[in-house]
Image (cartoon, grey):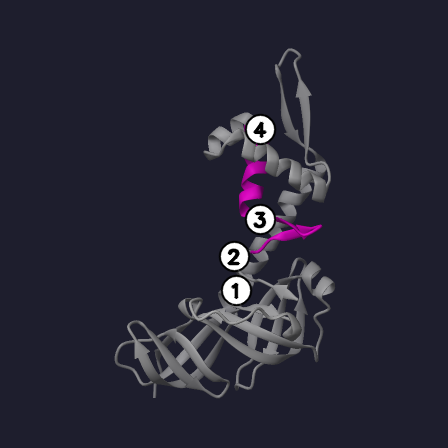
Amino acid sequence: MDADAGFDASLRADDVPFDARDAALLRAIDDAGSLNAASDRLGRSYSRAHERLDALEDAFGPLVERTRGGPSGGGTTLTDGGHALVARFERLRDGYAAIAETSAAVLVGTVAERTGELGVVDTDAGAIRALVPPDAERVDVSVRADAVTLHDPAETPAADATSARNRFAGVVTAVERGDAVARIAVDVGAETPLDALLTTDSVERLGVAEGKRVVASFKATATRATPRET
């Protein structure tokens, strides 16, 4: 399992992702009435846009309807399936945004070392690399749900020292489902569980449930520490 969360969220079919760029392409086709005009509007090459649209239709089904010639000169319009896919993606993105604004774990710790703006903070869950203030020692480390990625312990990628990712083994303690997005709480040994965002489709596909063991990871550059008020 490898489930990314956040505003890079995407829908998937047959391992083909549908993301914000793809939604923008379909919306531009709908507005402009042709793939050629949509490509120009977005500053993309026609050939690449055509290839991408073909790949999306192979995975998600018919998304556009093409007409040739006639009084209007032909063009391209979205099918009902195309409109539905864009609407589904918008619901997903809105769901992420609404939850991410209010969902962040706060771990209390002490700054153990600094390297420029990045530092290591000792917490109950272990050492966390984060952006730290220059003078503070006791800090609150905030980890937003949209920054957390979940992995199956058996399939967790090897650590890469250059990525500055924090990794914590934990157990899923709660799965809160919405229409398109689920919030997953993961106990990593701290007073506050980490939250992660997954699509509801991903929850089913990856078998996420209470009691499942996972590895939660998040980038140091997306993790901010603030001085703790005493």
Give the CA separation, mark 2 to mark 1: 7 Å
The image position of residue 4, as x and y in percent, is: 58, 62
Instruction: For mark 2, give the secondary structure.
Output: loop
Residue 83 showing in the rendered view: no
Q: Residue at x 59, y 65 (%)?
A: 197
**How far, Cα to Cα, is label 4 from label 2?**
26 Å
Query: Could you tell which of marks 2 and 3 lies nearer the N-terminus?
Result: 2
Q: Which residue is mark 3?
A: 19
Residue 185 is inside the magenta segment: no
Foreground: 183 or 131? 131
Residue 7: which disc? 2
User: In the rendered structure, which amino acid carries the disc numbered 4?
Assistant: Leu
Mark 1 falls on what kind of element?
Answer: helix
Secondary structure beneath dot 3 equals loop
Magenta-colored span = 9-32
In the image, which is nearer the foreground, mark 3 or mark 1? 3
Q: Quadrant of the C terminus?
A: bottom left
Quickly name the residue at label 4.
35
Q: What residue sits right under mark 1 in the picture?
A: 146
User: Are the residues tagged 2 and 1 within 8 Å (C-beta)?
Assistant: yes
**Crowd class of label 4 (few under 14; some 14 to 19; many from 20; radius 10 Å):** many
Amino acid type of the residue tagged 3 in the rendering: Asp
Is 30 covered by the magenta stretch? yes
Q: Residue 229 versus residue 214: which sits nearer the camera?
A: 214
Q: Is residue 125 above or below residue 3?
A: below
Report how far apart the C-alphas of labels 3 and 4 lie in the structure: 18 Å
Q: Which is in the foreground here, disc 4 or disc 2?
A: 4
Front residue of this view, candidates 20 and 165: 165
Sequence-first tag of 3 and 1: 3
Assess disc 1: are there few (<14), some (14-19) or many (≥20) residues with their C-alpha within 10 Å of its C-alpha: many
Q: Is residue 205 above or below residue 156?
A: above
Residue shown at 56%/62% (left/top)? 5
